[in-house]
Image (cartoon, helix red, strand yellow):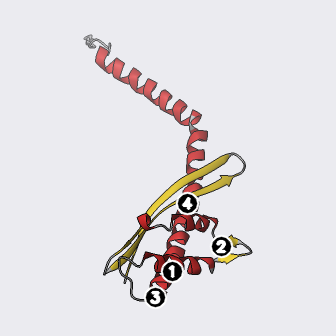
Amino acid sequence: MKKIKIRFKNRKANIPITLLVFMALVLTVYALYSFNTNDKKVSSEVSDSRFLDYIYSQENEINFYVGNVMEKSIAKTGQINSGNYQAFIDNFKIELYKYKKNQTFIITELSQIEPQLIGDNIEITDKFVSLNLNIKIEKKFHDKFIISYLYNKKFVKSI
């Protein structure tokens, strides 16, 4: 019987392949550890989107009420020219007070508008009336968080 010798090649793996497998294992373990420890942080950031929802809803309500008051004030003032600031301001205040019930506004942020009704914040031309307002929106959540947002907008209505 004839003996056949089979020669096996060197079974040692190359060093770069060994390092690649080792680094992949280290990276996998680190990723799993990182996801596990940061799980609470990620979930709290996602659940805090309600803060932005509140701010956006307040902005929308402010836009609606101020736009409505401006339209009615322009209609009541009649012919508006660049020197007719006071008539527009007076009509704006009258319309604004219609949104006051029991000495408080429907939206508390509307109370910040009256002190800003000065000539520097109002621009009147032949085609439009613009009003620059800075309104601070604040909300307290669960006695832990206080959101304070300064809403700066130029409200423009055509004549």
Q: Nearer the viewer, mark 3 or mark 1?
A: 3
Q: Nearer the viewer, residue 138 or 50?
A: 138
The C terminus appears in which quarter of the rendering?
Answer: bottom left
In the picture of the structure, the residue carrying the numbered disc 1 is: 68
> Which residue is tagged 2?
106
Q: Is residue 41 above or below residue 55?
A: above
Using residue 5 as the reference point, say whether residue 117 is left or right of it.
right
In the rendered structure, which disc, 4 or 1, sits on the residue that comes first in sequence?
A: 4
Disc 3 to disc 4, C-alpha distance: 30 Å
Measured as percent of width and height from the top left, residue 107 is found at: 63, 69
The residue beneath circle 3 is 75
Q: Position of residue 10 (x, y in %)?
A: 28, 11
Rounded to the nearest angstrom, the CA distance separating label 3 from label 2 is: 23 Å
Q: Secondary structure at mark 4?
A: helix
Amino acid on which the number 1 mark rests in the picture: Asn
Q: Is residue 27 above or below residue 118?
A: above
Type of amino acid under label 3: Ala
CA neighbours of label 4 inside 10 A, class few (<14), some (14 to 19), many (20+): some
- As helix, strand or loop, the secondary structure at mark 3 comes to helix
Residue density around tag 2, few if under 14, some if 14–19, many if 20 or more, within 10 Å: some
C-alpha span from label 3 to label 1: 11 Å
First of labels 3, 4 by sequence position: 4
- Neighbours of disc 1 within 10 Å: few (<14), some (14-19), many (20+): some
Towards the viewer: 93 or 23: 93
Q: Amino acid at mark 2?
A: Ile
Mark 2 or mark 1: which comes first in sequence? Answer: 1
Taking depth in this image into account, of 56 and 124 the one nearest to the observer is 124
Q: Badge 4 is on which residue?
A: 55
Q: Secondary structure at mark 1?
A: helix
